[in-house]
Amino acid sequence: MEESPNDANPSPPIDPRFSGVYIPNVTFGTYEVSSTANPSSVVGQIPSDSKPDAGAQSALGKAYYSGSGVDRDLSRALLWFGASAAQNNGYGQYMLGYMYENGEGVRPDIKTATEWYKKSAQNGYAAAKEWLVNHTQKSKK
């Protein structure tokens, strides 16, 4: 599985004291959450009209998927990848495809997986393009 495009600049680890819901230095619209902020005080400070950052949502999905800094939770991974995918994040869309293809946290559904891979490829995610090429070749044999 290809890593997220943000892996070249990895995010700091998730603060486990906040049950994996807090990532330091995440941008919500124009509001940046400082890594030194008290997580419980940050929530009330984020303007309600701020649009959460799709990359941060993907990072949360990846953390829950892999169990990195939090307990592994495929339901939460699916939720965060879905929120990211709704904002046209190619990695989030790819991971939804991967989870549907392999039945991770959901029933296996190759049709839904293919739809997510197509959306991811349209957003330029290389691994999704590769999957579509390989899947098309396999179905022709």
Image (spheres, rainbow, N blue to C red):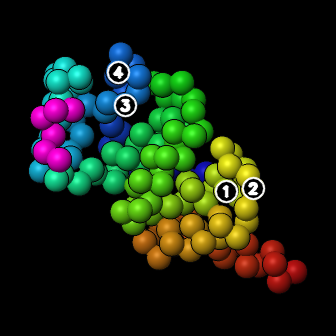
Residue 27 in sight here? yes
Instruction: Indicate whether 90 appears above or below 132.
Output: above
Q: Are marks 2 and 1 in contact (CB under 8 Å)?
A: yes
In the image, what residue type sits under mark 3? Val
Task: Give me the C-alpha separation between circle 2 and circle 4.
Answer: 32 Å
Q: Are marks 3 and 1 in contact (CB under 8 Å)?
A: no
Name the outermost residue toward the right.
141
Q: Nearer the viewer, residue 141 or 111?
A: 111
In the visual, does 58 lie left or right of 3?
left
Task: Give me the C-alpha separation between circle 4 and circle 3.
Answer: 6 Å
Dot 3: few (<14), some (14–19), or many (≥20) neighbours within 10 Å? some
Residues in magenta, as a range: 43-48
Q: Are marks 4 and 3 in contact (CB under 8 Å)?
A: yes
Residue at which label 4 appears: 18
Name the outermost residue toward the bottom.
140
Task: Give me the C-alpha separation between circle 3 and circle 1.
Answer: 24 Å
Q: Which mark is residue 21?
A: 3
**Is residue 85 part of the magenta span, yes or no?**
no
Q: Which mark is residue 100?
A: 1
Dot 4: few (<14), some (14–19), or many (≥20) neighbours within 10 Å? few
In the image, what residue type sits under mark 2? Pro
Q: Identify which residue is drawn at 41% across, 62% down.
A: 86
Quarter of the image with the C terminus is: bottom right
Instruction: Indicate whether 6 appears above or below 24.
Output: below
Residue at which label 2 appears: 108
Q: Which mark is first along the chain, 4 or 1? A: 4
Q: Nearer the viewer, residue 117 or 41?
A: 41
